[in-house]
């Protein structure tokens, strides 16, 4: 994959935001969009976990996730949500048909809303085997991001 950007929408934990920054930089994400009520730098809670990546990774805050998605679509990005859904494709079987992908991760409890899923081109998920059917958003983000970045 040539270009991967990430939209972190309505992430409530500043520590999760910091972890997403750190992982995004490590995975080679091109840009991070923080939308909705997702916290953004400068915040000590983000910096504590991000370890400076919030100063090295290009990012922007925009309250409106719709405007970010609309602009990315105009720029030729495939919009992909990471969410458990009957329409979702196993993340490690997904192959992006375009070289530019925008990955959306959502709220820790509610995930990516049905309204937001309707704005996406594809939905991918991480299959879960245990009784708990979800992962921490930052952990799930890391798994999916490294898989997307390493796909040819």
Image (spheres, rainbow, N blue to C red):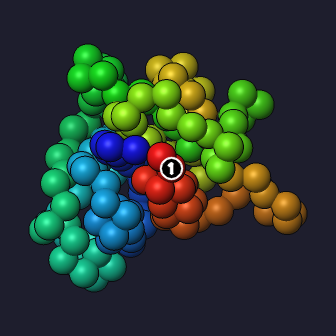
Q: Quadrant of residue 61?
A: top left
Left or right, residue 97 beside residue 135: left
Q: Position of residue 40 (x, y in %)?
A: 23, 58
Q: Which residue is mark 1?
A: 151
Left or right, residue 130 beside residue 4: right
Instruction: Depth check: give the residue in front, 32 or 45.
Output: 32
Whether residue 18 can be seen here: no
Q: Position of residue 139 (x, y in %)?
A: 54, 66
- Residue located 69% across and 34% down the image: 88
Q: Position of residue 44 (x, y in %)?
A: 21, 77
Image quarter where the N terminus lies is top left
Is 30 rendered above or below residue 96? below
SS at badge 1 = loop
Left or right, residue 44 beside residue 115: left
- Residue located 17% across and 47% down the image: 60
**Numbered marks: total:** 1
Mark 1 residue crowding within 10 angstroms, few (<14) / some (14–19) / many (20+) = few
Q: Position of residue 19 (x, y in %)?
A: 39, 70
- Residue located 25% across and 81% down the image: 51
Instruction: Depth check: give the residue in front, 123 or 148.
Output: 148
Is 17 rendered above or below residue 103? below
Whether residue 147 can be seen here: yes
């Amino acid at each position: 994959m040539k270009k991967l950007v990430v939209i972190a929408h309505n992430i409530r934990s500043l520590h999760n935001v910091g972890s997403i920054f750190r992982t995004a930089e490590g995975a080679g994400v091109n840009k991070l969009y923080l939308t909705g009520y997702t916290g953004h730098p400068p915040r000590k809670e983000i910096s504590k976990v991000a370890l400076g990546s919030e100063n090295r990774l290009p990012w922007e805050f925009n309250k409106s996730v719709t405007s970010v998605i609309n602009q990315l679509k105009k720029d030729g990005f495939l919009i992909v949500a990471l969410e458990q859904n009957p329409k979702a494709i196993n993340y490690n079987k997904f192959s992006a048909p375009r070289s530019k992908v925008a990955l959306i991760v959502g709220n820790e409890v509610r995930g990516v809303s049905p309204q937001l899923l309707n704005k996406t081109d594809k939905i991918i998920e991480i299959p879960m085997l245990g009784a708990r059917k979800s992962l921490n958003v930052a952990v799930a983000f890391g798994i999916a991001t490294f898989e997307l970045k390493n796909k040819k």
